[in-house]
Amino acid sequence: MTINHQQIPKKILFFPDLINSEDSGARSARSTLKNLIDLGFEVAVFATDVEKSNNYFQYDSCKLYKIESKMSAVSHFWDIKLLQQFKKIISEFRPDFFFMAGSIQKPSILASFARKAGIKNIFLFYINDYYCAKTYAGLNNGPCFKCIDLGLSQALNNNCIKRDPKLINFYKSLLVMKRLQFEMKNSYKVLGYTKDQIDIYKRIGITNNKCSIINYQFDPNELNNINTKEGDYFLIIGQPILEKGWHTLSEIITNCKSDIKIKIIFKNLEVENNIIKKYKLEKHILNGTITTLRNITERYEIIKYIAESKGMIIPSYYPTTGEFVLLESLVLGKPVLVFNAGAHKELIIHEKNGMVAEIGDFNNFASNIDRINTDSNLLKNISSNAREAAKKIFSQSNNVKLLNVFK
């Protein structure tokens, strides 16, 4: 079946992971949806959580299609119920574009069906999880690209597969990834936020003409009317996992020479105890350098801690697309302290709008913290420049980049 379209405005069937929660992916999806609507497209949303009763979802102009089947890895290859529902949606809504945003988990069979029906497939990955057979498993020493450079078998060779049975889980991951990459290579467009992200697309075989850089799918207006002040602490938040660089924290803090104070927000006491032990942070708590906070679930509370901090420690070690906490910090004029990994290499200019250290250089990272802690002029200048960087990143004209994708 081939669909010919003449509708104006163009129709987009939007397929995110989630859209109705405080999850960063859902927040990105809502920003994407708002941008598409503001640009004049007619949009339908196909997702697992599109109930209008949810307070997060306020786009009454959209058609909503709730996924009826329970998706799994098998859904990438065959899911009769999902396909039947998708065919019905395509027949009813008749989209010009099928826009998949989020992570690798969205079933490739839908992209295959849309492509064969003459619908233009567009991919946008909020995280770079489409090239590593076990996402970011080999990051002890920085970003790992062994699966790209030497083949996906590197996940087995380097013991990246932790879940038993390892061989079955490896082949499941490999097949899903290969199936997805096939559709990416045969798509209309694959979108990214930075040159670094686009370069990874190209390394897995996506041709240059299919790759486009767009604006960050993040709404800075959510931070309007937030009062900021210069606090006496640095803040660390986010997932306490290897790819976020938590294994570097103890050594970085040990190398700091000034009297620093750090607050870390944990999900709950159980997570806090596990992470403190895993990443050897006990001594820093005992000597008073680190203070822990927990059970802070409301976003406005987290934003308040960012707004009243001296700066944000974001030690990510993976090829990040740009964490929300980094974007929020820039909007609020807070110095960010990062390694030159992923999007940070392009967004953060050392000593101008943030402080950047080479991956693995813990002494330099610690020195950057000390300088922000003790040099009020440097802190003031970086804070001002961070706000200016945010204005540039989120300027209204940047939406033209997204508009130009849907030609």
Image: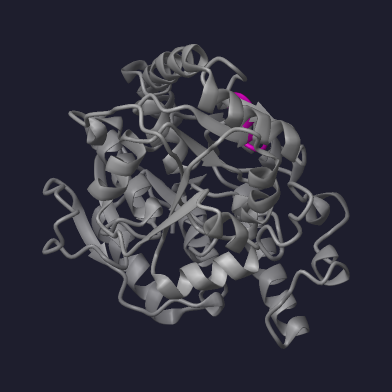
Q: Quadrant of residue 31?
A: top left
Residues shaded magenta: 339-346
- Give the farthest residue toward the front: 287
Q: Pinpoint residue 86: horizontal percent, then vertical percent.
A: 36, 66
Which is more toward the observer, 202 or 58? Answer: 58
Q: Which of the image's four quarters has the N terminus?
A: bottom left
Does residue 190 appear left or right of residue 160 in this picture?
Answer: left
Q: In the shown orientation, is residue 143 left or right of residue 69?
A: right
Task: Pinpoint residue 165: horizontal percent, then vertical percent.
Answer: 72, 88
Taking depth in this image into account, of 174 and 162 the one nearest to the observer is 162
| Farthest bottom residue in view | 165
Residue drawn at x 21%, y 59% as measured from the top left: 64
Q: Residue at x 67, y 44 (%)?
A: 252
Q: Position of residue 400 (x, y in %)?
A: 38, 21
Residue sitting at x 74%, y 36%: 363
Instruction: Name the side, left or right, on which 72 lies relative to 169.
Output: left
Was residue 341 drawn as part of the magenta stretch in this picture?
A: yes
Residue 401 locus on image (x, y percent): 43, 24
> Residue at the spot x=69%, y=54% of the render?
131
Quadrant that contains the C terminus: top left
Q: Nearer the viewer, residue 318 or 336?
A: 336
